[in-house]
Amino acid sequence: MALKVVIIGGGSSYTPEIMEGFLKRYEQFPVTDIVLVDVKAGEEKVKIVTALAKRMVLKAGKDIRVSYTFNRKEALQGADFVTTQIRVGGLQARAYDERIPLKHGMIGQETNGAGGIMKAFRTIPVMLEIAQEMHEICPDAWLINFTNPAGIVTEAVMNHSPFKNVIGVCNIPFNMRSGVGELFQVPAERVMIEFVGLNHFVFGRKVYIDGVDRTAEAMHHLIYDDVDYSPANIVALPWNKQFLKTLNMLPNPYHQYYFQHEQVLKKDVEAYQTNVTRAEVVMEVEEALFKKYQSPNLDVKPEELEQRGGAYYSEAACNVMTSIYNNSMDVQTVNTLNNGTITDLPADCVIEVNSVITASGPMPLSIGNLPAVISGAIVQMKQYERLVVEAAVTGDYSKAYAAMIMNPLVTSDDKAQVVLDELLHVHQSNLPQFSKEVVKQ
Amino acid sequence: MALKVVIIGGGSSYTPEIMEGFLKRYEQFPVTDIVLVDVKAGEEKVKIVTALAKRMVLKAGKDIRVSYTFNRKEALQGADFVTTQIRVGGLQARAYDERIPLKHGMIGQETNGAGGIMKAFRTIPVMLEIAQEMHEICPDAWLINFTNPAGIVTEAVMNHSPFKNVIGVCNIPFNMRSGVGELFQVPAERVMIEFVGLNHFVFGRKVYIDGVDRTAEAMHHLIYDDVDYSPANIVALPWNKQFLKTLNMLPNPYHQYYFQHEQVLKKDVEAYQTNVTRAEVVMEVEEALFKKYQSPNLDVKPEELEQRGGAYYSEAACNVMTSIYNNSMDVQTVNTLNNGTITDLPADCVIEVNSVITASGPMPLSIGNLPAVISGAIVQMKQYERLVVEAAVTGDYSKAYAAMIMNPLVTSDDKAQVVLDELLHVHQSNLPQFSKEVVKQ
Amino acid sequence: MALKVVIIGGGSSYTPEIMEGFLKRYEQFPVTDIVLVDVKAGEEKVKIVTALAKRMVLKAGKDIRVSYTFNRKEALQGADFVTTQIRVGGLQARAYDERIPLKHGMIGQETNGAGGIMKAFRTIPVMLEIAQEMHEICPDAWLINFTNPAGIVTEAVMNHSPFKNVIGVCNIPFNMRSGVGELFQVPAERVMIEFVGLNHFVFGRKVYIDGVDRTAEAMHHLIYDDVDYSPANIVALPWNKQFLKTLNMLPNPYHQYYFQHEQVLKKDVEAYQTNVTRAEVVMEVEEALFKKYQSPNLDVKPEELEQRGGAYYSEAACNVMTSIYNNSMDVQTVNTLNNGTITDLPADCVIEVNSVITASGPMPLSIGNLPAVISGAIVQMKQYERLVVEAAVTGDYSKAYAAMIMNPLVTSDDKAQVVLDELLHVHQSNLPQFSKEVVKQ
Amino acid sequence: MALKVVIIGGGSSYTPEIMEGFLKRYEQFPVTDIVLVDVKAGEEKVKIVTALAKRMVLKAGKDIRVSYTFNRKEALQGADFVTTQIRVGGLQARAYDERIPLKHGMIGQETNGAGGIMKAFRTIPVMLEIAQEMHEICPDAWLINFTNPAGIVTEAVMNHSPFKNVIGVCNIPFNMRSGVGELFQVPAERVMIEFVGLNHFVFGRKVYIDGVDRTAEAMHHLIYDDVDYSPANIVALPWNKQFLKTLNMLPNPYHQYYFQHEQVLKKDVEAYQTNVTRAEVVMEVEEALFKKYQSPNLDVKPEELEQRGGAYYSEAACNVMTSIYNNSMDVQTVNTLNNGTITDLPADCVIEVNSVITASGPMPLSIGNLPAVISGAIVQMKQYERLVVEAAVTGDYSKAYAAMIMNPLVTSDDKAQVVLDELLHVHQSNLPQFSKEVVKQ
């Protein structure tokens, strides 16, 4: 029986990781066809990656057809699962997202602040197109999105397309479980964290080892043992101990942008001034990776990829696909519709939440009210995210400004406008929803 | 390692069933000690049941110590799980609950209508005592309640005792899954029903077979194939086909009391007039059962017990205990705290809901808003239940009247008072919370 | 400056009352034009009423043009206020609404039970037409609806037409204030009741005299002094004293249908059997009234009208119009959008609530949570009302059945269908939204 | 008949303004006794103010007894209204609140940021004492609080004292109405603004002139006509035009701290560096005022007082007292219990809202959901305020840190601690709730 997976943005340097994931899980998830889809501009990369993927399959001795195409609609025929790892505008766009805000003294990370807003603006129209095509071509397939900002992008698809089989995944929850596992010296599989919140703004309210609540010990370790579960792609500053005591929950690495705003800004401005913001670093890493990928002797995922930043993204994606396929009913952390799971947030928003994964998709475990200390921050973050989605979908300048000014990392009404205008201008070609007039200047 | 289970109301005719449950699950749930607790008045019965239980253990060749006691506190020492299958006032009390309302032309079933109110009034004080003792003696043990009205009783413990490790179980959800399994000719294990609502007022919103949504087919079967999943202890009338079409969800057998009020009332009044209300029937069944239990050759659960009415109650209880013990994280249907799971109901109420069963107890799957067609009925039922709990806990006559008049089966302000007064009077000795003055007349 | 009022259903026997209302308020509400609109079939009546209205104006010596027309659109040109007092199908339809349910042992009052459902089904399509016309012809005018079931009809217009300037009024709140005024021997103007709930299902939570909370005294009077503030058109049974004590709020006369269901049903069945349901009574009253109205010497509202049942309806309507006209910002009780006023009810439903009346319409005073004892009943009633609106707007048979079975006065799934089918059949010509097929039989 | 007003903090320089308010309203609010209460340390000031107040009464020719005392409990005997205008720690404390945060590069205004937190910490214990005394001595009197942060202080009293007759007032809503009145060239009395939000974080969602919605014009004026309705005590920066367009509501002057964070911080840091933060300015103004007050020829409120900053505070207070006294039922903007008025906020929090003022206190006009664009910000602000109250009441250091880190003007986990510790230290003597240990260092 055929089991077909389509990887949109298949020419990404991450692809070998997801390939490894499929090979590891072949018994439970006997994939027969993998199609890498990319844009013509990425032809060279997708060819390199496809060749490597084929070598990996050969080495593993599995019966999987691997191919690439520039024709997305064709690829979607008969698809069972579709993953998206696209970067609209490429790393150059990322560089703008990071550098323009920093020029004006604002944080511009690719999922937070003005940068995250822009990435959403560029990504959402493309994702809505993909969702529409899936609705028409493979309506029962599942779309597993790990393009950032993953929560916002997933919400846009959920609320603005007829296609509802979409799930957002992120490596942070898995990283946090692994980190906690190290603290307790148990494998991540025995760790359950009750995640509460939003993608990149999720907190770990409870820590269970084998189902037993060990939150207090986990917090003690975190405060006194200097754990770090930050992914490679963001800075990692130590937390103030009192912050952790007061929070009494696990923060995630991205919380630094908000609760260590000053320190991160300082660090990022320095990076900006010395020309080494994240985009520049990644560009170099990518170049090296693709050089490596071309080696005809390479037939496994190279170790260097783990330093790329998004390690375990594809782990999360493969786990979800496998459990849907098998109706496993295990608990995984995904981005899906809130629908009352967190009572403080709108029913139709997307949250990051532990869910039972079934053949009909994720069924979230109820959370109830947000913990008091973080409820205001999470509600505000979600409200900001909704403004982003609304602006991304409508191309309305006033809503785009609303998203800017309500972002907690934006601290001036005037600069909000200056930075927004500059960003809309440089990204013009990837923002079809915003009229020329708006982005001209 | 010891694994101790205490069965309160151990002299019940149901005990052989739960014994069978333990023996079947011995590999996963290696119980070492089973203590049957009962009141001195039930000495004869508890002795008979203990002897039978011992014979069952011997036959099965397991290493389980079985004993009985009248000293509840002593029994609770070192307990891991406690189940309650008590009937305060015995079957005579049930007879009053059924007959006095019927005398005045009102339904008086043991979980619905005036009868259910009274059973709650008698049971809740005893359950709060047990919970208090567990809080002091075995605070980490789990209380698995299947005394009716199970949802109301569980809510009373949850909100009015310091002990929170309480779970209510009922056989109805399991019966419904079995019934649906028969429709699709698959074992109940492959059936998942999304249960929405309250104990004895739960609806099946979605039917999944192997995780795939088959609700439409299930409804079609139900409408045209005349399925019956009613337990033996309640009447079973056929549903109006349009009712099922409009509902588009699985009703549960107890819904007859509300949506076939007239027909059930007529049937019950006839039973009353011919002296064969349920209590009378059960008295006879019980007598026969205990005669059988005494036979020294009997060393298994006798088949007749299945006709007793509560079949599968202990199945549900054993499943919950086994999954807690093993942190199995499978999905079971239990009565637990709402905490936002159903957004239309108060956070601190108890609902009947699919939950992941962990070593830390049940984690409900989020439901969100109630389906429009039944939301009013469920909200009203829960509000009524809360009035019952409040009256049961305070012994306040005015609140007891509130519970009566807000019960959908009570249709007259005057009769509400007459029936309430008569019932308080006959049950006086089992209602310590109501002052003499209130119940005198 | 012109101030034009259009009275739809102007040939109603109530018109002299509203005429009197305008004449009394002429200084504050200097109406210049009153147009009575009716259907051609009511020509005789509307002519009689118009003539009487003219004589009343003449006697009062005011400068008001009174006219009638069968052309509603023409009448709406330049209108400032439009009132509706229509009865689709006339009193014959009412007779069916009352008698068919009673034939099957069910209450069939014109705003409660199956009768109320049918009246809503007949009225809503006409009201939506009127609202649509106002939207096009006089979008800034106000529609003051007092056609029953007033709350349901107002909700239908609010949610299913583009025209939002609609306010529902009822005489019950005013009757209740007058009744309380009598208890305290003060004029109704000094009484404020905090009304909580829905039209014909509203409770008086607090009673203020001159702004001072006197609820306890009011309840004491009500319990021990046998007050009656029932309008003439419904039965008036005494309340059980314990009911009032437990409620600790003022019930309204229509609550009898629910909390004295048995007694009212008995009384209504007797009336049915002796052929004197309300419709028959009203037919006689109407005939006598119109005979009187024709007298050329009559130039004031005849006293007999007060016995007609709806006394003070027009009082309520005139008060609202006068306060809107003057931006008076006084507090009146109207049916308007909930919008969070009662947090237990949907934002987009219509409630009966104290509101500050401004030139921009009513601004409700916040209520918050419903009182526990009645919250279940009110939520259920509103949910039922929403099912009625949905069925009335869509003509969907299954939704019509849903409204029937969820009505608290309907107590059998089978009878719900029988009664629904008979009613749909007899009213067929006034139910264009229900397809022939549905109502055939 | 006696009508007694007690002014706590009576020695304040504001007292002549409230005296003027009483004299202006004497016909509607015939006060007979005014008692100024202050602490012994303020003896000189309260004597000066009392003497001036007496001269004002004499000049006006009214029959009002004015006196002062240091015995608060005695003063409260027979009180009808109590106002509070206290400043715990005096202007020196304010200087700390402003300067310590600024030293670390953080805004430290007296109602916003770290400064506002500290002012709440000092004020709340005293207010709870006053409330407790009123509960015992004059339980039917009304406490009209205008001590800042007025919303937070009012919420603390509402939720942590048995005394519920408390109302918070602020001059900002009145200033905004006046400002809008100027735009439309009508008196403030004809302006109604629908205020939505919290004290010092309130927005004007709708603008009505004579009850007619004129919001669009008001926004146009605001954007293009450069209106300013800032009080004298805070900086007044021009708003970015796009900010106003996107907001499409009236901001209040304090919103600058949040949406012009950078600009305000820059300005305040400059002031700090040149030693002219607000406390210093006020100290000088106060000195000049008291010099003036001593003049035996002064028998009216001196004009200079209007420049003091809090102009119209007492106007708001006098209006509320007059309407309660007369059960006027007019609409005023006050700080009172939310109770569902804003559905996004907790029922038991205090909001700033238009309310009908009755003899039983304010009855808020329903608001419903917050407008999307500001809902996140308001929810977060309220959540922060609740953390402040909790810390102020418990003296819990961890909660105090929570309030700091969740304040939108605090942008570093480390600095949050440094600034908190320094402030707790310097204010030690006025923070009895925080243990010595906590504030030592």
Image (cartoon, coloured by chain):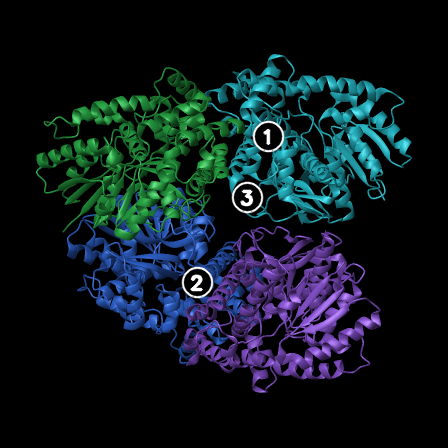
Chain colours: A cyan, B purple, C blue, D green
Amino acid marked by disc 1: Trp
**Which x, y percent locates residue A237?**
62, 26
**Which x, y percent locates residue B99?**
54, 81
Chain label for disc 2 = C
**Which x, y percent locates residue B15?**
71, 73
Q: Are marks 1 and 3 in contact (CB under 8 Å)?
A: no
- Residue that sits furthest to the top in the current view: A274
Same chain for the residues at labels 1 and 2, yes or no? no
Front position among marks 2 and 3: 3
Distance Cα–Cα, label 1 vs label 2: 49 Å
> Mark 3 highlights which residue?
A370
Disc 2 element: helix
Same chain for the residues at labels 1 and 3, yes or no? yes
In the rendered image, the vertical position of residue C279 relative to residue C35, given as above or below = below
In the rendered image, the vertical position of residue B283 relative to residue A191, given as above or below = below
Amino acid marked by disc 2: Val
Amino acid marked by disc 3: Leu
Chain label for disc 1 = A
- Asked if one can make out residue C139 in the rendered structure from this viewpoint, the answer is no
Mark nearer the N terminus (1 vs 3): 1
Distance Cα–Cα, label 2 vs label 3: 28 Å
> Mark 2 highlights which residue?
C373
Q: Quadrant of residue C293?
A: bottom left
Distance Cα–Cα, label 1 vs label 3: 22 Å
Q: Quadrant of residue C171?
A: bottom left
C14 lies left or right of D156: left
Q: Residue at x 14, y 45 (%)?
A: D32
Front position among marks 1 and 3: 1
> Mark 1 highlights which residue?
A239
Q: Residue at x 70, y 73 (%)?
A: B68
Report the front residue among B183 and B289: B289
